Amino acid sequence: MTHNLAIIAGRGSLPQELAFGLRAQGKEPFLIGIEGENESWLEGFEHSVLGWGQFGQLFKLLAEHKANQVVLAGSVTRPKINIAKMDWGAIRSLPEILAFMIGGDNSLLSGVINLFEKRGIEVVGAHQVMPKLLATKGPIAGRRPPGKALANIKKAAEASKVLGGLDIGQAAVAVGGRVVAVEGIEGTDGMLERVVSMRASGRLYENGRFGVLVKTMKPNQEMRVDLPAIGPDTINRLAEAGLRGVGVEADRSIILEREKTLKLANFHDIFIYGMDTTGHD
């Protein structure tokens, strides 16, 4: 079977949601799992699993399946360079790979995209394949946030944009009119765990009634990869952290497993709000 679209699948629900969504549309994607990151659901699709550094084999597979488009979906662990495990295709590209590995996530992702585009393969975003993944503007779950929560959204959005400009993270938490946590290398889940610890230790005096998580796209970020995303796990962690809701950028953020996510948000009385790029309503 030939495929025009291939999904390079990392961890998480996004690759699976894309694959089954495309199948429901009568389109059968070819899946490429990453060794150490792939999951058992791949067995239901035509797929291959490759290790980091098998770039030659990767492009050979794409050519065999006549895939002229790829989607990079799911989270991955930043790879370590191991020349002994590289195939000839990767070794030939080693200077280029080392150059973009030195920088932050934006540098890495832009470099990976360039590797594909130099070979005539178009990289498309998950939201381009399934537009319904994108957050819309205004209330998505729950009612419109009250004034104090909107003020916290604006404060956290400002911090998140500064953080993103430094290519560090995409999220911040604001409680009681001040930013109390920002996302680092540990990711959003790790940041929310810190908020849980702060609340348990009494360092957060406000009861969380208006506290919020905000996720924003990094300035100058390549939209085809690594858009901010929330899903069921995010909502459960917000409930554990005692926060009131989450603000995401409309048309620049993904809501995973939307039906389940919205159901959980309503159960926990947590709002999901699609804001404009400045954090305003």
Image (cartoon, rainbow, N blue to C red):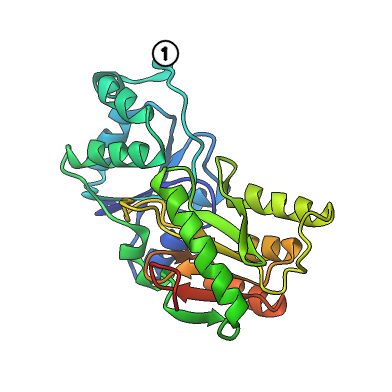
Q: Residues within 10 Å of mark 1 (few under 14, many from 20)?
A: few
- Left or right? Give the position of 17 relative to 165: right
Instruction: Give the percent coordinates (x, y) of residue 136.
Output: 42, 77
**Vertical placement of residue 232 versus 72, above or below:** below
- Name which residue lies at 67% across and 67% down: 176
Answer yes or no: is residue 16 visible: no
Q: Nearer the viewer, residue 191 or 229?
A: 191
Q: Which residue is mark 1?
A: 84
Residue at image coords 48%, 62%: 157
Q: Quadrant of the C terminus?
A: bottom left
Q: Residue at x 43, y 64 (%)?
A: 253
Residue 55 in which image quadrant = top left
Residue furthest bottom as drawn: 143
Give the quarter of the image for residue 205: bottom right
Count of residue discs: 1
Residue 139 locus on image (x, y percent): 51, 82
| Residue 50 seen from this side | yes
Residue 46, above or below 105: below
In the foreground, 72 or 139 = 139
Q: Nearer the viewer, residue 248 or 63?
A: 248
Horizontally, residue 141 falls left or right of residue 109, namely right
Type of residue at label 1? Ala
Element type at marker 1? helix
> Which quadrant holds residue 134?
bottom left
Residue furthest to the right in view is 201
Where in the figure is residue 111, as x and y percent of width and height?
29, 36
